[in-house]
Image (cartoon, rainbow, N blue to C red):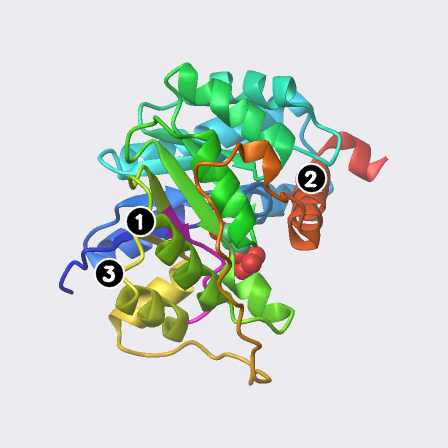
Amino acid sequence: MKRPSTKMFLDSGDPGETRAVLQTLGFLDGQTTNPTLIAKSPEAAARKERRQPFTNEELWEFYKRVVQEISGLVPQGSISIETYADLTTTAQKMLKQAREFNSWIPNAHIKFPTTAEGLKAAGQALAEGIRVNMTLVFSQSQAAAVYSATTGASRGDVFLSPFIGRLDDIGQQGLDLIKNIQQMYQKGGGHVMVLAASVRSVAHLQSLLNLQADIITAPAKVLLAWTKGEEISTLPQPPLQSIPYEELNLNADWQSFDLHHELTDKGITKFSEDWNSLLQAAVK
Ligand code: G3P
């Protein structure tokens, strides 16, 4: 398979999938994880099934072991590790986790939710030399805020993760958000790399390659089907509504942009629930 100019990441919390994709694809530029993906990884899922929950400490140790294994398999790539956050988690709490996670492996990007607290934490993390991945992005104004809040960072130190499949889920054309952000970022200095996430099909992946997205992260089943020239089975979708481009000033103060999106809040809630479902309190 010819290596595209777009960087290809695996979206998974399972090192077994990293091995399988490396074997079939022959390369990987990185891997993204999140609390839901960690909860789905075979060892965590088996413990949940056996009703054998983790203590908080054990769960961090488990995440660390998984991430270190993946980092060893993709040593030249970037591995995203996500901070635990619910809707009340402060920037300070996220930052504390970021410092710890960044010490686990040499090639980490630390994921923060694209909220005011997440951006405060990310700004400080960057100042401390920690690379960041702003996640759960669903709007162009969130992307503008990330750009503005991280101005001065080097290209490669800031990833922005718009979730296209989840916009499709609510009837909006997720790919339009990528196009709009690319168009807006053309006016800037290029320090933020767009990492297209929530990729559900080979058609998504192919469209993102055509758009020359900086980075694509996709589940193993999508990457494997793509290498075989196949499509995964996808449900028929109703027509999607296009997302209009907005004129936004990238030099405006990041706090002036509207950071709220219902899917960001929903995503944070689901990530924290999936994480908490692995802990002892969940089976009491
Ligand atoms: O990288 C983000 C991704 O894991 C979310 O995907 O399919 O849950 O929307 P999905």
Residue shown at 48% from the left, 23% from the top: 123
Picture layout, residue 203 above or below residue 95: below
Q: CA distance from mark 1 to mark 3?
A: 9 Å
- How packed is label 2: few (under 14 Cα within 10 Å), some, or many (20 or more)? some
Q: Which mark is residue 24?
A: 3
What's the residue type where badge 2 is placed? Ser
**Image quadrant assignment for residue 256:** top right
- SS at circle 3: helix
The residue wearing badge 1 is 19
Q: Is residue 269 left or right of residue 205?
A: right
Q: Mark 1 vs mark 2: which is more N-terminal?
A: 1
Range drawn in magenta: 194-201
- SS at circle 1: helix
**Image quadrant assignment for residue 25:** bottom left
Residue most extreme to the left: 2
What's the residue type where badge 3 is placed? Thr
- Classify the position of the C terminus by image quarter: top right
Asked if residue 196 lies in the magenta stretch, the reply is: yes
Picture layout, residue 271 above or below residue 106: below
Q: Mark 1 vs mark 3: which is more N-terminal?
A: 1
- Classify the position of the N terminus by image quarter: bottom left
The residue wearing badge 2 is 272
For residue 133, say whether it is visible. Answer: no
